[in-house]
Amino acid sequence: MRFLFKTSYAQELGLFRDNVQRNWYVALFAALLVLPRVVPDYVGDISLVFIYGLCGLSLMVLAGYTGLISLGHAAFLGIGAYAHVFFAHDLQLPWIVSVALACVITAAAGVLVGLPALRMTGVYLTIATLAFALIIQEIFSRWDRVTGGLKGKPVDKPVLFGFSFASELAFYFLCLAVLIGALWLTANLLRAPTGRAWVAIRDSEIAAQSMGVNVAVYKTMAFAYSAALMGVAGALFAHKISFLAPDIFSVLLSIQLLLMVVVGGLGSLHGALYGAVFVAILPVLISQARDAVPAWHGLDRFVKQPGLEPGLFGLILVLFILFEPLGIYGRWMKVKLYFAMFPLYKRATFKRQKAYMRSERLR
Amino acid sequence: MDTILQLLLNGLAVGCIYGLVALGFVLIYKATELVNFAQGDLLMLGAFTCYMFVVWYGLGYWAAFALAIAIVALFGAALDATVLRRVIGQPQFAVVMLTIGLGAIFRSFASITWGSEIYTLPTPFSARATRLGGVTVSHEYVSIIVGTVVLCAALYAFFTYTRVGVAMQAASQNQLAAYYMGIPVKRMFSLIWAISAGVAAIAGVLLAPVSLIDINLGFIGLKAFAAAVLGGFGSIPGALVGGLTIGLIELFAGAYLPHGVKDVAAYVVLLVVLAVRPQGIFGAVGRKKV
Amino acid sequence: MTLLEADNLAINFGGITALAGVSFEVRAGEVLTIIGPNGAGKTTIFNLVSRIYDPTRGRLSFCGEDITRVPPHEIARRGIARTFQNIELFEHATVLQNLLLGRHAHKRSRFVEELLFLPRVRALELEHRGAVEKVIDFLDLQPYRDSLIVNLPYGVRKVVEMARALCTQPKLLLLDEPSSGLSVEETEEMAFWIQDIRTLLGITVLMVEHDMSLVSAVSDRVVALNYGLVIAAGTPRDVQAHPDVVKAYLGG
């Protein structure tokens, strides 16, 4: 077991716990730089993982840190994507300006949803975001002039400062850079008073309020920031899929995004990224596993049914909620602790307290 | 005038379905504070089960109807006993995700078992109508309205006059006190899940002749949410009134407002209501006690 | 000097009258305790002072300023901090993070600065940390600094909650049943801390308490409440002996 010596208060303000941790991250970064050379065939898929990572980050801020569950994040992704394509193609604005504008518009949409959401709690908020997403999806399919309606809208490759990111490799690095930037900004917020206020709202709104947190303002900020991240993700996503159609941004995508943060582990930035990797890899794994199933009593035909995949996603979600509510990140922490404490690991360390029905209603 | 009457009738029928699904949400929410996002998918299972008995096994409509209710209700109780009981008291988030996951599993199950085509359920009311003045009264719609009224009366009587019904109300209001009074709270909750699933199945079978059956039938649950929220989520009459309101708004919006408004009318109303009265129309102001 | 003054406060919930016109004042530098049987309206007074509830009638003033309509998050900035009867800590955060949130009322950094974590934010964070460490030293919380609240025993959580309230550097501290759920030893310790808070930090304390030994040990004055009305006020000894108070507790 390694002990950490703390010698100054400033030490705890750093992004990394200690030099060892920082070196690991540097190593990871180096690995990501050479990764395209190692697996050239998967560069496009990995870019998608980065984009999902951005989405995960966005939802993690809102759901994992502020405790506001949104079932409408696909709508923000869509708004970001359509807005970016509209500015960059139809209005021919420079890429950076277009992304920034898309960001502002999604943030504004976030505030729009956030404002009525302030007075709602728990499930009402979730349902309100769901309703919002369904309305937005309908707008996508009806507002032909901007969105191309049901016919869809093709998207060109990004061009930045005259440099084209048309190749998979260039796009890979663009996504990586944006993701790292977003991670840095988010980590900054989380170690500053704003992040603490968000966590406070998540754990006890009433105490946060008595400590001077303006709950309305911070909830709106969380919505706006989360939506803005989603806007950037949407712009990249548009380039990635290179064709926008309204039914991409459905409730199912919102659910998949939520699945990402739950499976990754709520309340940690690591979790958002683990979840992104998981959600991106799972379909690949499923399709490979399908091919490996033997033709025993028609079992192979059974597993090749198209309807099976969403069910598998659902099953994974259910199993995680029941058996590992802390997600992959939580499991990773347990494994780490197991080896750190070996042979003295106690299962009870992570045992949840027995919970009885906790009423959120006043009686 | 006739058009309006016609719309009123159809709107009420559609609204009844929303109301019934919303009723299922509310029953479970009142008892366990869980919000069941899979309620719509239970409805879909009910419709498919009935279809299977009628078309595959050649059972009569009424027998198939009864069997479908019984099977889905049992399934609801089993679901509570095996899965949902574990998440009581956990954060809202876990519950929402869990039921969403369950819904996905149900849809997958339906698509594997019954296929992903679209089916019609033949019923004694199919394609029959009576003309009353200028209004075409389709028997399918009448069956929905009558079914809803009968079901609500039965539920009302059950919760007010039977021992079990009163015990259930007690368990919903104060879990611990009910437990101390010797009410088997866990069994009550399973029973509430059974009733709620049964109501969903009834709604599914009533809806089937009007709307055709496919695995996405459950998405009607999203609109029923609007109904439940409109009614305050904790109120059973509220859920029904909410359902009827949504049904009427939808049909009238479809007739008099531009194309596309019909599909989102329910959600717009929902957002407006939540923005103005966050606790719904019939809901009580709730706040955590400190 | 009067710090907090409640004038004819009343509140109804639906048809139930929780407070029916309560007046009292808290003088600077004293420890005032509100006692009363369950349901007398003690915690309701706290919720009114911290502006979680709106009074139906009456007026609240703090430092000579009317705070009856001030939004709840402004209360901490004016110098009132509180604890809760059933502990409302941020359970999935460390003790340190909880205490740092207590500094929120003194936040001076802007959103964009925080987004980029500019040197100014860093300096401000260090300043907050310094203030928090003083409270940690004062209440002997050093061993728990990095523990998550969920892993702490109840008694420690009680102290952490008090520490969080102290981090706001309040003029008036509201303690809602500081001894509930504590052992006899922990209650004695709590009594010393309340005295220290008053004498060493110069903070005025208004508390709700049931434990009479703690009440008599620390309070300068006591207000007794029953059915939403003040039935007695004065020194702990006088109030305890007051016939109406005896009647309220023992019935008859």
Image (spheres, coloured by chain):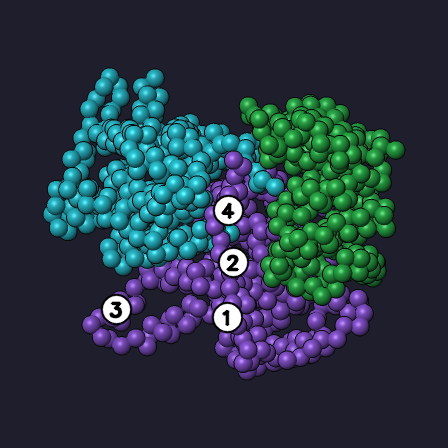
Chain colours: A purple, B cyan, C green
Going by the numbered disc 4, the residue's amino acid type is Arg
Looking at the picture, how far across and down is residue C54, in whole percent?
A: 67, 30
Q: Can you tell which quarter of the image residue C116 is in?
A: bottom right
Checking the image for residue A353, the label placed there is: 2
Going by the numbered disc 3, the residue's amino acid type is Arg
Q: Can you tell which quarter of the image residue B86 is in?
A: bottom left
Q: Residues within 10 Å of mark 4 (few under 14, many from 20)?
A: few
Secondary structure state at the residue bearing disc 1: helix
Q: Is residue A217 above or below residue A194?
A: above
Q: Which residue is mark 3?
A: A301
Tell which circle, 1 or 4, labels the residue nearer the N-terminal end: 1
Tell which circle, 2 or 3, labels the residue nearer the N-terminal end: 3
Quarter containing the N terminus of chain A:
bottom right
Tell which circle, 1 or 2, labels the residue nearer the N-terminal end: 1
Tell which circle, 1 or 3, labels the residue nearer the N-terminal end: 3
Going by the numbered disc 2, the residue's amino acid type is Gln
Checking the image for residue A347, the label placed there is: 1
